[in-house]
Amino acid sequence: MVAIASRSTVLAVVREVTENLLRIPQAATDYVPLQADGSMEPNYDQIENLEIKASIGRTAAIQGGENPVTSLSFYLKGSGTEGVAPQWNELARSFFGEETVEATQRVTAAGSTVSTFNVTGAAAAGIEQGYGVLIKDPVNGYRVRVCDTVTTNSFTPSFTVPVAPGTTVGLGKPVYWTPANDSHSPLSVWRYEGNGGAVQAIAGCKVNDFSFSLAANDAINATAGLEGLSYYFNPIEITSSTRYIDFTDDAGTFAAAVTAQWYRDPHQLAEAITTAMNAAGSAEVHLVEYSDSLGKYVFTCDGSTVLSLLWNTGANTANTIGTKVGFLVAADDTGAGGTVGYTSDSAATLTSPYTPTYDSTQPNVAKNQEIMIGTQTEYVCFEASSVDFSGTDGIRKIESICAESGRSGSIVNSRECEITVVALLNKYDAKMMARFRNGTSIRFQMTVGQKSGGNWTAGTVVYGYGPQCKVTSISLPDDDGLISINLTIQPAVSDTGTPEFYLGQL
Protein backbone atom coordinates (compact mmCIF):
# COMPACT_ATOMS: atom_id res chain seq x y z
CA MET A 1 0.00 0.00 0.00
CA VAL A 2 1.23 3.49 -0.91
CA ALA A 3 -0.34 6.19 1.28
CA ILE A 4 -1.16 9.63 -0.15
CA ALA A 5 -0.16 12.84 1.69
CA SER A 6 -3.21 15.11 1.76
CA ARG A 7 -1.30 18.37 2.27
CA SER A 8 0.15 18.08 -1.25
CA THR A 9 -3.34 18.14 -2.80
CA VAL A 10 -4.14 20.88 -5.32
CA LEU A 11 -7.52 21.95 -6.69
CA ALA A 12 -8.42 23.52 -10.03
CA VAL A 13 -11.66 25.23 -11.07
CA VAL A 14 -12.14 25.56 -14.83
CA ARG A 15 -15.04 27.16 -16.68
CA GLU A 16 -16.54 24.72 -19.18
CA VAL A 17 -17.11 25.56 -22.84
CA THR A 18 -19.87 22.96 -23.08
CA GLU A 19 -21.82 22.08 -19.94
CA ASN A 20 -20.92 18.66 -18.52
CA LEU A 21 -17.97 18.22 -20.90
CA LEU A 22 -15.01 17.84 -18.55
CA ARG A 23 -12.34 20.48 -19.21
CA ILE A 24 -8.77 20.21 -17.96
CA PRO A 25 -6.94 23.16 -16.35
CA GLN A 26 -5.80 25.64 -18.99
CA ALA A 27 -3.21 27.64 -17.02
CA ALA A 28 -1.31 27.78 -13.73
CA THR A 29 -3.82 30.39 -12.53
CA ASP A 30 -6.81 28.01 -12.73
CA TYR A 31 -6.15 26.81 -9.17
CA VAL A 32 -7.66 27.84 -5.82
CA PRO A 33 -5.64 27.29 -2.63
CA LEU A 34 -7.23 24.47 -0.65
CA GLN A 35 -8.10 24.30 3.02
CA ALA A 36 -8.40 21.05 4.93
CA ASP A 37 -12.22 20.92 4.98
CA GLY A 38 -12.68 20.53 1.21
CA SER A 39 -14.40 17.41 -0.08
CA MET A 40 -15.64 15.69 -3.24
CA GLU A 41 -18.28 12.97 -3.26
CA PRO A 42 -19.60 10.69 -6.07
CA ASN A 43 -23.27 10.27 -5.23
CA TYR A 44 -25.92 8.25 -7.08
CA ASP A 45 -29.66 8.05 -6.56
CA GLN A 46 -30.51 4.66 -5.06
CA ILE A 47 -33.71 3.30 -6.59
CA GLU A 48 -35.61 0.76 -4.55
CA ASN A 49 -35.92 -2.65 -6.21
CA LEU A 50 -39.50 -3.83 -5.58
CA GLU A 51 -39.04 -7.41 -6.75
CA ILE A 52 -39.90 -10.06 -4.17
CA LYS A 53 -36.96 -12.45 -3.72
CA ALA A 54 -38.48 -15.09 -1.41
CA SER A 55 -37.03 -13.31 1.62
CA ILE A 56 -38.07 -10.67 4.09
CA GLY A 57 -34.68 -8.97 3.55
CA ARG A 58 -34.08 -5.92 1.41
CA THR A 59 -33.39 -6.39 -2.29
CA ALA A 60 -30.27 -4.66 -3.63
CA ALA A 61 -30.95 -1.10 -4.76
CA ILE A 62 -30.65 -0.04 -8.40
CA GLN A 63 -28.08 2.63 -9.33
CA GLY A 64 -29.92 5.75 -10.52
CA GLY A 65 -28.90 9.22 -11.67
CA GLU A 66 -25.68 10.93 -10.60
CA ASN A 67 -25.56 13.67 -7.97
CA PRO A 68 -21.86 14.39 -7.33
CA VAL A 69 -21.04 17.27 -4.99
CA THR A 70 -17.94 19.15 -3.93
CA SER A 71 -17.12 21.92 -1.50
CA LEU A 72 -14.14 24.07 -0.54
CA SER A 73 -13.12 26.93 1.70
CA PHE A 74 -10.93 29.84 0.68
CA TYR A 75 -9.85 33.23 1.98
CA LEU A 76 -11.90 36.19 0.76
CA LYS A 77 -9.06 38.32 -0.59
CA GLY A 78 -8.13 40.24 -3.72
CA SER A 79 -5.72 39.24 -6.47
CA GLY A 80 -3.26 41.98 -5.54
CA THR A 81 -3.71 43.78 -8.87
CA GLU A 82 -6.66 46.07 -9.54
CA GLY A 83 -8.57 45.13 -12.66
CA VAL A 84 -7.40 41.49 -12.38
CA ALA A 85 -9.85 38.98 -10.92
CA PRO A 86 -8.89 36.87 -7.88
CA GLN A 87 -8.42 33.14 -8.28
CA TRP A 88 -11.81 32.36 -6.74
CA ASN A 89 -13.56 34.41 -9.42
CA GLU A 90 -14.98 31.42 -11.31
CA LEU A 91 -16.82 30.37 -8.16
CA ALA A 92 -18.31 33.86 -7.79
CA ARG A 93 -19.16 34.01 -11.48
CA SER A 94 -20.93 30.65 -11.32
CA PHE A 95 -22.93 31.67 -8.26
CA PHE A 96 -23.89 35.24 -9.23
CA GLY A 97 -24.09 34.72 -12.99
CA GLU A 98 -22.36 37.80 -14.38
CA GLU A 99 -18.78 39.07 -14.08
CA THR A 100 -17.54 42.52 -15.12
CA VAL A 101 -13.83 43.36 -15.33
CA GLU A 102 -13.07 47.08 -15.62
CA ALA A 103 -9.80 47.75 -17.45
CA THR A 104 -9.95 51.57 -17.26
CA GLN A 105 -9.75 53.73 -14.16
CA ARG A 106 -12.42 56.45 -14.09
CA VAL A 107 -11.72 59.80 -12.40
CA THR A 108 -13.97 62.35 -10.75
CA ALA A 109 -15.07 65.52 -12.49
CA ALA A 110 -15.61 68.96 -10.97
CA GLY A 111 -18.57 69.54 -8.71
CA SER A 112 -18.75 66.24 -6.82
CA THR A 113 -20.45 66.32 -3.43
CA VAL A 114 -20.47 63.98 -0.45
CA SER A 115 -23.54 62.24 -1.89
CA THR A 116 -23.06 62.59 -5.66
CA PHE A 117 -19.90 61.82 -7.59
CA ASN A 118 -19.43 63.47 -10.96
CA VAL A 119 -17.71 61.35 -13.60
CA THR A 120 -17.68 62.54 -17.20
CA GLY A 121 -19.95 60.27 -19.21
CA ALA A 122 -20.65 57.99 -16.24
CA ALA A 123 -23.49 56.14 -17.92
CA ALA A 124 -21.64 55.82 -21.22
CA ALA A 125 -18.56 54.56 -19.37
CA GLY A 126 -20.47 51.56 -18.09
CA ILE A 127 -20.81 52.66 -14.47
CA GLU A 128 -23.88 50.93 -13.07
CA GLN A 129 -25.32 49.73 -9.80
CA GLY A 130 -22.80 47.41 -8.14
CA TYR A 131 -19.79 49.13 -9.72
CA GLY A 132 -17.36 49.66 -6.85
CA VAL A 133 -15.03 52.65 -6.57
CA LEU A 134 -11.84 53.08 -4.59
CA ILE A 135 -11.76 56.85 -4.11
CA LYS A 136 -8.03 57.57 -4.12
CA ASP A 137 -8.32 60.96 -2.46
CA PRO A 138 -4.78 62.04 -1.50
CA VAL A 139 -6.08 64.80 0.77
CA ASN A 140 -9.01 63.22 2.61
CA GLY A 141 -7.97 59.55 2.51
CA TYR A 142 -9.12 56.57 0.46
CA ARG A 143 -12.73 55.41 0.68
CA VAL A 144 -14.64 52.51 -0.84
CA ARG A 145 -18.14 53.08 -2.12
CA VAL A 146 -20.49 51.33 -4.53
CA CYS A 147 -22.60 52.91 -7.24
CA ASP A 148 -26.29 52.85 -6.36
CA THR A 149 -27.96 54.92 -9.08
CA VAL A 150 -26.44 56.58 -12.13
CA THR A 151 -27.35 59.48 -14.40
CA THR A 152 -25.56 60.78 -17.46
CA ASN A 153 -22.53 62.32 -15.77
CA SER A 154 -22.82 61.32 -12.12
CA PHE A 155 -23.80 58.58 -9.72
CA THR A 156 -24.96 58.36 -6.14
CA PRO A 157 -22.82 56.14 -3.92
CA SER A 158 -23.99 53.49 -1.49
CA PHE A 159 -23.10 55.72 1.45
CA THR A 160 -21.97 59.32 1.63
CA VAL A 161 -18.37 60.32 2.32
CA PRO A 162 -17.26 62.81 5.01
CA VAL A 163 -15.66 65.18 2.48
CA ALA A 164 -16.47 65.57 -1.21
CA PRO A 165 -13.70 64.28 -3.50
CA GLY A 166 -11.87 66.81 -5.63
CA THR A 167 -11.38 66.82 -9.38
CA THR A 168 -9.51 64.02 -11.27
CA VAL A 169 -9.45 61.72 -8.23
CA GLY A 170 -8.90 58.11 -9.36
CA LEU A 171 -11.71 55.61 -8.73
CA GLY A 172 -9.89 52.31 -9.26
CA LYS A 173 -10.65 49.35 -11.53
CA PRO A 174 -13.36 47.09 -10.13
CA VAL A 175 -13.99 43.44 -10.87
CA TYR A 176 -17.52 42.69 -9.74
CA TRP A 177 -20.20 40.02 -9.86
CA THR A 178 -23.84 40.80 -10.48
CA PRO A 179 -26.76 38.47 -9.71
CA ALA A 180 -28.28 37.29 -13.01
CA ASN A 181 -31.32 35.25 -13.96
CA ASP A 182 -29.33 32.97 -16.28
CA SER A 183 -25.85 32.29 -17.74
CA HIS A 184 -24.44 30.75 -14.56
CA SER A 185 -21.15 29.22 -15.69
CA PRO A 186 -20.78 25.42 -15.50
CA LEU A 187 -17.44 24.37 -14.04
CA SER A 188 -15.09 21.41 -14.05
CA VAL A 189 -13.59 20.95 -10.60
CA TRP A 190 -10.42 18.87 -10.18
CA ARG A 191 -8.78 17.51 -7.03
CA TYR A 192 -5.28 16.14 -7.53
CA GLU A 193 -5.05 14.15 -4.32
CA GLY A 194 -1.51 14.40 -3.02
CA ASN A 195 -0.69 15.78 -6.49
CA GLY A 196 0.31 12.36 -7.71
CA GLY A 197 -1.75 9.92 -5.65
CA ALA A 198 -5.21 10.08 -7.25
CA VAL A 199 -7.37 12.39 -9.33
CA GLN A 200 -11.00 13.25 -8.70
CA ALA A 201 -13.03 15.45 -11.02
CA ILE A 202 -16.64 16.54 -11.42
CA ALA A 203 -18.06 18.03 -14.63
CA GLY A 204 -21.13 20.26 -14.94
CA CYS A 205 -20.69 21.91 -11.55
CA LYS A 206 -22.64 25.00 -10.51
CA VAL A 207 -22.28 26.81 -7.20
CA ASN A 208 -25.39 26.35 -5.09
CA ASP A 209 -23.92 27.82 -1.89
CA PHE A 210 -21.62 30.83 -1.57
CA SER A 211 -20.94 32.13 1.92
CA PHE A 212 -18.39 34.21 3.80
CA SER A 213 -17.80 35.06 7.41
CA LEU A 214 -16.20 37.94 9.31
CA ALA A 215 -15.44 37.38 12.98
CA ALA A 216 -13.46 40.09 14.75
CA ASN A 217 -9.72 39.32 14.88
CA ASP A 218 -10.04 36.21 12.71
CA ALA A 219 -9.21 35.51 9.07
CA ILE A 220 -12.03 36.33 6.67
CA ASN A 221 -13.05 33.03 5.15
CA ALA A 222 -15.46 31.96 2.43
CA THR A 223 -16.99 28.65 1.38
CA ALA A 224 -18.50 27.36 -1.84
CA GLY A 225 -20.63 24.27 -2.33
CA LEU A 226 -21.19 22.90 -5.83
CA GLU A 227 -23.54 20.38 -7.42
CA GLY A 228 -22.32 18.56 -10.51
CA LEU A 229 -23.51 16.14 -13.16
CA SER A 230 -20.70 13.60 -13.75
CA TYR A 231 -17.97 12.24 -11.47
CA TYR A 232 -14.56 10.93 -12.60
CA PHE A 233 -11.76 9.06 -10.82
CA ASN A 234 -8.33 9.02 -12.48
CA PRO A 235 -10.01 10.01 -15.76
CA ILE A 236 -8.42 9.64 -19.21
CA GLU A 237 -9.31 11.71 -22.25
CA ILE A 238 -9.20 9.92 -25.59
CA THR A 239 -9.35 12.21 -28.62
CA SER A 240 -9.56 11.65 -32.37
CA SER A 241 -5.75 11.73 -32.47
CA THR A 242 -5.25 9.17 -29.66
CA ARG A 243 -7.91 6.51 -30.29
CA TYR A 244 -6.35 3.75 -32.45
CA ILE A 245 -4.74 0.38 -31.65
CA ASP A 246 -2.95 -1.43 -34.50
CA PHE A 247 -2.15 -5.04 -33.65
CA THR A 248 -1.19 -8.38 -35.12
CA ASP A 249 -2.32 -11.75 -33.76
CA ASP A 250 -2.46 -15.30 -35.12
CA ALA A 251 -5.34 -14.31 -37.41
CA GLY A 252 -3.64 -11.32 -39.07
CA THR A 253 -3.17 -7.57 -38.67
CA PHE A 254 -6.04 -5.36 -37.56
CA ALA A 255 -6.90 -1.82 -36.51
CA ALA A 256 -9.23 -1.01 -33.62
CA ALA A 257 -10.59 2.35 -32.55
CA VAL A 258 -12.18 3.37 -29.27
CA THR A 259 -14.70 6.19 -28.93
CA ALA A 260 -13.14 9.62 -28.45
CA GLN A 261 -14.42 10.81 -25.07
CA TRP A 262 -13.52 11.21 -21.39
CA TYR A 263 -13.40 7.84 -19.64
CA ARG A 264 -14.64 7.87 -16.06
CA ASP A 265 -11.82 5.69 -14.73
CA PRO A 266 -9.06 3.42 -16.10
CA HIS A 267 -11.26 0.33 -15.93
CA GLN A 268 -13.84 1.91 -18.22
CA LEU A 269 -11.10 2.63 -20.77
CA ALA A 270 -9.74 -0.93 -20.49
CA GLU A 271 -13.23 -2.28 -21.18
CA ALA A 272 -13.59 0.02 -24.21
CA ILE A 273 -10.25 -1.11 -25.67
CA THR A 274 -11.19 -4.76 -25.12
CA THR A 275 -14.48 -4.24 -26.94
CA ALA A 276 -12.80 -2.39 -29.83
CA MET A 277 -10.09 -5.04 -30.35
CA ASN A 278 -12.62 -7.85 -30.29
CA ALA A 279 -14.73 -6.00 -32.87
CA ALA A 280 -11.78 -5.43 -35.25
CA GLY A 281 -12.26 -8.71 -37.17
CA SER A 282 -9.88 -11.19 -35.56
CA ALA A 283 -11.12 -14.63 -34.61
CA GLU A 284 -9.08 -14.48 -31.40
CA VAL A 285 -10.35 -13.11 -28.11
CA HIS A 286 -8.52 -10.11 -26.69
CA LEU A 287 -8.52 -8.82 -23.13
CA VAL A 288 -7.22 -5.49 -21.81
CA GLU A 289 -7.11 -5.09 -18.04
CA TYR A 290 -6.09 -2.27 -15.77
CA SER A 291 -3.88 -3.27 -12.82
CA ASP A 292 -4.92 -1.43 -9.67
CA SER A 293 -1.65 -2.35 -7.97
CA LEU A 294 0.63 -1.14 -10.79
CA GLY A 295 -1.39 1.63 -12.40
CA LYS A 296 -0.69 -0.04 -15.77
CA TYR A 297 -2.61 -1.73 -18.58
CA VAL A 298 -2.11 -5.40 -19.56
CA PHE A 299 -2.89 -6.57 -23.12
CA THR A 300 -3.40 -10.32 -23.74
CA CYS A 301 -5.29 -12.62 -26.10
CA ASP A 302 -6.07 -16.32 -26.32
CA GLY A 303 -3.72 -16.91 -29.27
CA SER A 304 -0.54 -18.49 -27.95
CA THR A 305 1.79 -17.76 -30.88
CA VAL A 306 1.64 -14.12 -31.96
CA LEU A 307 0.55 -10.84 -30.39
CA SER A 308 2.23 -7.61 -31.50
CA LEU A 309 1.14 -4.07 -30.61
CA LEU A 310 2.12 -1.90 -33.58
CA TRP A 311 2.63 1.49 -31.89
CA ASN A 312 5.38 2.54 -34.34
CA THR A 313 4.66 0.76 -37.62
CA GLY A 314 0.88 0.43 -37.67
CA ALA A 315 -1.39 2.15 -40.16
CA ASN A 316 -2.59 4.56 -37.46
CA THR A 317 0.73 5.34 -35.78
CA ALA A 318 0.07 9.10 -35.87
CA ASN A 319 -3.14 8.58 -33.88
CA THR A 320 -2.13 5.75 -31.56
CA ILE A 321 -3.58 5.29 -28.10
CA GLY A 322 -0.23 3.96 -26.89
CA THR A 323 0.99 6.94 -24.88
CA LYS A 324 -2.43 7.29 -23.23
CA VAL A 325 -2.12 3.82 -21.74
CA GLY A 326 1.52 4.16 -20.73
CA PHE A 327 3.43 2.53 -23.61
CA LEU A 328 6.59 3.85 -25.24
CA VAL A 329 5.59 4.22 -28.88
CA ALA A 330 9.04 4.70 -30.45
CA ALA A 331 9.02 0.95 -31.11
CA ASP A 332 6.41 -1.80 -31.46
CA ASP A 333 5.84 -4.33 -28.70
CA THR A 334 6.66 -7.69 -30.26
CA GLY A 335 8.02 -11.11 -29.33
CA ALA A 336 5.55 -12.22 -26.67
CA GLY A 337 2.76 -14.73 -27.13
CA GLY A 338 -0.81 -13.67 -26.71
CA THR A 339 -1.34 -15.35 -23.37
CA VAL A 340 1.74 -13.56 -21.97
CA GLY A 341 0.96 -10.23 -23.56
CA TYR A 342 2.35 -6.81 -22.71
CA THR A 343 2.21 -4.49 -19.71
CA SER A 344 2.46 -0.68 -19.95
CA ASP A 345 5.93 0.81 -19.58
CA SER A 346 4.72 3.61 -17.33
CA ALA A 347 2.06 3.92 -14.65
CA ALA A 348 -0.84 6.33 -15.04
CA THR A 349 -0.01 10.02 -14.62
CA LEU A 350 -1.91 11.42 -11.63
CA THR A 351 -0.27 14.82 -11.21
CA SER A 352 -1.65 18.24 -12.05
CA PRO A 353 -0.75 19.47 -15.56
CA TYR A 354 0.44 22.78 -14.08
CA THR A 355 2.25 23.92 -10.98
CA PRO A 356 -0.32 26.27 -9.44
CA THR A 357 0.40 29.99 -9.24
CA TYR A 358 -1.60 31.54 -6.42
CA ASP A 359 -2.46 35.16 -5.64
CA SER A 360 0.32 36.52 -3.45
CA THR A 361 -1.90 38.66 -1.22
CA GLN A 362 -2.17 37.82 2.48
CA PRO A 363 -5.52 36.72 3.93
CA ASN A 364 -7.61 39.57 5.28
CA VAL A 365 -8.24 39.67 9.03
CA ALA A 366 -11.46 41.11 10.46
CA LYS A 367 -9.90 44.19 12.06
CA ASN A 368 -9.55 47.71 10.68
CA GLN A 369 -12.23 46.82 8.11
CA GLU A 370 -15.58 48.53 7.46
CA ILE A 371 -19.25 47.63 7.83
CA MET A 372 -21.99 50.15 7.07
CA ILE A 373 -25.69 49.49 7.73
CA GLY A 374 -28.56 51.94 7.41
CA THR A 375 -29.48 54.92 5.25
CA GLN A 376 -27.10 56.56 2.80
CA THR A 377 -25.87 59.11 5.36
CA GLU A 378 -24.95 56.48 8.00
CA TYR A 379 -21.35 55.99 6.86
CA VAL A 380 -19.82 55.48 10.32
CA CYS A 381 -18.52 51.92 10.72
CA PHE A 382 -21.09 49.67 12.40
CA GLU A 383 -19.37 48.11 15.44
CA ALA A 384 -20.16 44.46 14.72
CA SER A 385 -18.34 41.53 16.28
CA SER A 386 -19.35 39.20 13.46
CA VAL A 387 -20.98 39.36 10.04
CA ASP A 388 -22.02 36.31 8.03
CA PHE A 389 -23.29 36.28 4.46
CA SER A 390 -25.05 33.21 3.08
CA GLY A 391 -26.19 32.89 -0.52
CA THR A 392 -28.07 29.91 -1.93
CA ASP A 393 -28.87 29.16 -5.56
CA GLY A 394 -31.65 26.68 -6.26
CA ILE A 395 -30.44 24.30 -8.97
CA ARG A 396 -32.89 22.34 -11.12
CA LYS A 397 -31.32 19.31 -12.80
CA ILE A 398 -32.46 18.55 -16.36
CA GLU A 399 -33.47 14.88 -16.39
CA SER A 400 -32.49 13.02 -19.57
CA ILE A 401 -33.01 9.41 -20.56
CA CYS A 402 -30.24 9.81 -23.16
CA ALA A 403 -27.55 11.23 -20.86
CA GLU A 404 -24.99 8.81 -19.37
CA SER A 405 -25.42 10.40 -15.94
CA GLY A 406 -29.22 10.55 -16.28
CA ARG A 407 -29.02 14.35 -16.32
CA SER A 408 -27.98 16.49 -19.27
CA GLY A 409 -27.62 19.86 -17.57
CA SER A 410 -28.89 22.16 -14.86
CA ILE A 411 -30.57 25.53 -14.49
CA VAL A 412 -30.39 27.99 -11.59
CA ASN A 413 -34.03 28.82 -10.90
CA SER A 414 -33.93 30.63 -7.56
CA ARG A 415 -31.59 32.66 -5.36
CA GLU A 416 -31.71 33.70 -1.71
CA CYS A 417 -29.30 35.78 0.33
CA GLU A 418 -29.14 36.43 4.06
CA ILE A 419 -26.83 38.43 6.31
CA THR A 420 -26.54 37.92 10.05
CA VAL A 421 -24.88 40.56 12.22
CA VAL A 422 -23.90 40.34 15.88
CA ALA A 423 -22.97 43.50 17.81
CA LEU A 424 -23.18 44.88 21.35
CA LEU A 425 -26.31 46.91 22.05
CA ASN A 426 -25.70 50.63 22.60
CA LYS A 427 -27.78 52.27 25.31
CA TYR A 428 -30.67 54.35 23.92
CA ASP A 429 -30.12 53.08 20.35
CA ALA A 430 -33.54 51.98 19.04
CA LYS A 431 -33.29 52.63 15.29
CA MET A 432 -32.83 48.98 14.26
CA MET A 433 -35.88 47.98 16.30
CA ALA A 434 -37.89 50.75 14.63
CA ARG A 435 -36.74 49.64 11.18
CA PHE A 436 -37.70 46.07 11.99
CA ARG A 437 -41.13 47.18 13.22
CA ASN A 438 -41.77 49.37 10.17
CA GLY A 439 -40.19 47.13 7.53
CA THR A 440 -37.92 50.01 6.52
CA SER A 441 -35.50 49.45 3.66
CA ILE A 442 -31.82 49.92 4.56
CA ARG A 443 -28.45 49.49 2.84
CA PHE A 444 -25.57 47.20 3.69
CA GLN A 445 -21.94 47.50 2.66
CA MET A 446 -18.93 45.45 3.67
CA THR A 447 -15.36 46.44 2.80
CA VAL A 448 -12.36 44.27 3.63
CA GLY A 449 -8.76 44.42 2.49
CA GLN A 450 -5.22 45.51 3.23
CA LYS A 451 -4.19 49.05 4.16
CA SER A 452 -0.99 51.03 3.83
CA GLY A 453 -0.56 54.30 5.68
CA GLY A 454 -4.22 54.12 6.68
CA ASN A 455 -5.40 53.88 3.04
CA TRP A 456 -6.89 50.88 1.28
CA THR A 457 -4.39 49.09 -0.98
CA ALA A 458 -5.63 48.72 -4.55
CA GLY A 459 -6.05 45.12 -5.67
CA THR A 460 -6.57 43.75 -2.15
CA VAL A 461 -10.04 45.16 -1.41
CA VAL A 462 -13.20 43.02 -1.53
CA TYR A 463 -16.61 44.65 -1.12
CA GLY A 464 -20.19 43.49 -0.82
CA TYR A 465 -23.26 45.68 -1.29
CA GLY A 466 -26.96 45.15 -0.70
CA PRO A 467 -28.88 48.19 -2.06
CA GLN A 468 -32.24 47.29 -0.57
CA CYS A 469 -32.34 45.18 2.58
CA LYS A 470 -34.76 44.63 5.44
CA VAL A 471 -34.27 43.48 8.99
CA THR A 472 -36.27 40.26 9.20
CA SER A 473 -35.47 39.22 12.75
CA ILE A 474 -33.89 40.76 15.82
CA SER A 475 -32.97 39.51 19.30
CA LEU A 476 -31.09 40.72 22.37
CA PRO A 477 -29.25 37.75 23.91
CA ASP A 478 -26.68 37.79 26.68
CA ASP A 479 -23.13 37.76 25.34
CA ASP A 480 -20.79 36.81 28.18
CA GLY A 481 -22.37 39.30 30.57
CA LEU A 482 -23.17 41.99 27.99
CA ILE A 483 -26.34 42.55 26.00
CA SER A 484 -25.86 42.02 22.28
CA ILE A 485 -28.11 42.76 19.33
CA ASN A 486 -28.43 40.02 16.75
CA LEU A 487 -29.80 41.04 13.36
CA THR A 488 -30.93 39.01 10.39
CA ILE A 489 -30.85 41.17 7.28
CA GLN A 490 -32.36 40.04 4.00
CA PRO A 491 -31.20 41.62 0.74
CA ALA A 492 -34.03 41.70 -1.80
CA VAL A 493 -34.56 42.63 -5.43
CA SER A 494 -36.15 46.02 -6.02
CA ASP A 495 -39.65 46.60 -7.36
CA THR A 496 -38.12 46.92 -10.82
CA GLY A 497 -36.12 43.72 -10.48
CA THR A 498 -32.63 45.18 -9.90
CA PRO A 499 -30.34 42.74 -8.07
CA GLU A 500 -30.21 42.25 -4.32
CA PHE A 501 -26.47 41.86 -3.63
CA TYR A 502 -23.20 42.58 -5.37
CA LEU A 503 -19.70 41.33 -4.68
CA GLY A 504 -16.54 42.87 -6.07
CA GLN A 505 -12.81 43.53 -5.88
CA LEU A 506 -11.02 46.86 -6.10
Image (cartoon, helix red, strand yellow):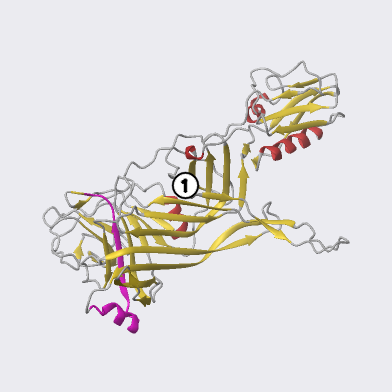
- Which residue is depicted at the point 30% across and 58% down? 216
Q: Residue 441 in magenta?
A: yes
Q: Relative to residue 352, is residue 425 drawn left or right?
A: left
* Residue 318 can be seen in this image: yes
Camera-side residue of 424 and 225: 424
Query: Under tag 1, what secondary structure?
Result: loop
Between 56 and 368, the one nearer to me in the picture: 56
Q: Which residue is mark 1?
A: 36
Callout 1, which amino acid?
Ala
Residue at the outermost left position: 139
Q: Which residues are magenta?
A: 429-451
Residue 266 at what x, y percent from top left?
A: 67, 37
Q: Residue furthest front?
A: 481
Residue 305 drawn at (x, y percent) = 85, 18
Foreground of the two, 211 or 239: 211
Quadrant hosting residue 499? bottom left
Q: Is residue 91 left or right of residue 188?
A: left
Q: Is residue 23 above or below residue 329?
A: below
